[in-house]
Amino acid sequence: MNENFQWRPQPEAQVVLDRLCAELLERSVFLQTFASRLEGECGTRLFDWIDYLVVPVCEVQNLPGVGFEICRQGGLHHPGAVFPKVFTNVEAEQVAEWGMGLKVDSCVEFAVAHGIRSLIEGKPTAPLRMLSVEDSPLVLVRAVERHGWFDMKLAGVSDATCVDYLKIQEAFLRRRRSYTDSAVGFSILNNLLDQAVALLGRARAADCFFRSERRFWMERNRAARVQKRRQDKLGLGWANHDHHTYRSSRENFAKLVATFERLGLECRERFHAGSEAGWGAQVMESEEAGIVVFADVDMSAQEVMGDFSHDGLAASENLGTVGMWCELHGDSLFEAGMHHLECQFDFEALADGLRHEAGIEMMAPFSDLPNLRQQFTLGELWKVDGMRIERLLENGQISSAQAKQFSERGAIGSHLENLERRNGYKGFNQEGVNQVIAATDPRRQ
């Protein structure tokens, strides 16, 4: 892993934030009920939905000692952890000394789900929208809907800009995803992304793009549809997303990275698992848009020494797990869609809820550590195009038995990933990812 990204748990900061959250719950009847419903109805934790905290000045003074730093947009943030930002009530422009913002996909959906009639601040699809949920001298609780906006203050945007967002969203949702020549596909997609960035800016364009990507993935994954329905009962959507995982053929990998860089994502740590694993990955992030991508590709140990994310990888007839998946279904950026979306959950509660409500079973955990727990739902089987199977068989890349299996049963396609982070841990478990990469090889189903 890149030495510049050695993420570590932050237990001291977690203790401070837990104490502040406990104080907020004491002050808020809504939060007490909401926290209970989150665990019981959709298998999530209140902490994972917090966009920001507002606390008295005396409390803010304690935060630099546990790793928080002043953020250029105002308030304090922890650069080494997955924690909410923290403001004073003066910075947040509110009367109450205490407050909390809750991450939601849509303030409208949240208002409908909870019968809230207060006005929504910010125009539809504006960079930031907020809805007062509980407003008293003791506490101010808001639902917070972001579209590529990292700031606390509402952005002034024109009606035309909001309409532009809707037009770009429509174009992303309806974009063509199947091409016989991938170079043509990248050219058309990148032209669309350039238009989006010109109209919306990188962060808003990224927000719009990945919302459409989550929807495409969800339509092909039953576990995702079930969980989305559970979260939508509370008006939340997918605002608890942790990262989006894309699988790419070797020859398209550098183009995939360049495409996401167009949207403002920057390369973070890289993963490689040695010669026995046959894969590598590039983590990318746009902090402003709140988007993280985990991009997987077949790769040898020797290729790790170079900048594989930008220099490119030559096509290979030897297909590892990722390459075989792409040959069966297409690259994630086009035909296949994401391999999985990973969201932050209450680990046990999610697994129990999906099993009891919809008979959805989980694979064995591939990370079960004090600060990180991860597991997939059982893979969704997708029908495989006969021409893809024939090509693989003719090239000697699958056996006759495997061809028969893929033709009759389909092949493993996508998953929903159950993730629980503790103590703000921002990293991933490389050894565990090794295991699950191998376990999701369609040839092993």
Image: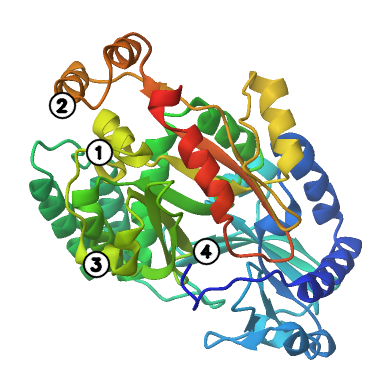
Q: Nearer the viewer, mark 3 or mark 4?
A: 3
Q: First in sequence, mark 3 or 4: give its number.
A: 4
Please, what secondary structure does the residue beneath circle 2 have?
loop
Query: In which quadrant of the rendered view does residue 181 lie?
Result: top left
Q: Distance between the Cα atoms at labels 1 and 3? A: 22 Å
Report if residue 160 is visible in the image.
no
Q: Label for residue 395?
A: 2
Please, what secondary structure does the residue beneath circle 3 have?
helix
Q: Distance between the Cα atoms at labels 3 and 4? A: 37 Å
Return the residue at label 3: 310
Q: Distance between the Cα atoms at labels 4 and 1? A: 49 Å
Name of the residue lying farthest toward the right: 26
Q: First in sequence, mark 3 or 2: give its number.
A: 3
Q: Label for residue 129?
A: 4
Label 4–label 1 contact, CB within 8 A: no
Q: Residue at x 44, y 24 (%)?
A: 444
In this rendering, the answer to whether 161 lies above or below 37 is below
Q: Residue at x 52, y 77 (%)?
A: 151
Q: First in sequence, mark 4 or 2: give its number.
A: 4
Camera-side residue of 102 and 131: 102
| Within-10-Å neighbours for mark 3: few <14, some 14–19, many 20+ | few
Q: Distance between the Cα atoms at labels 4 and 2? A: 53 Å
Q: Distance between the Cα atoms at labels 3 and 2? A: 29 Å
Label 1–label 3 contact, CB within 8 A: no
Q: First in sequence, mark 4 or 1: give its number.
A: 4
| Within-10-Å neighbours for mark 4: few <14, some 14–19, many 20+ | many
Identified by mark 2, the residue type is: Asn
Return the residue at label 1: 318
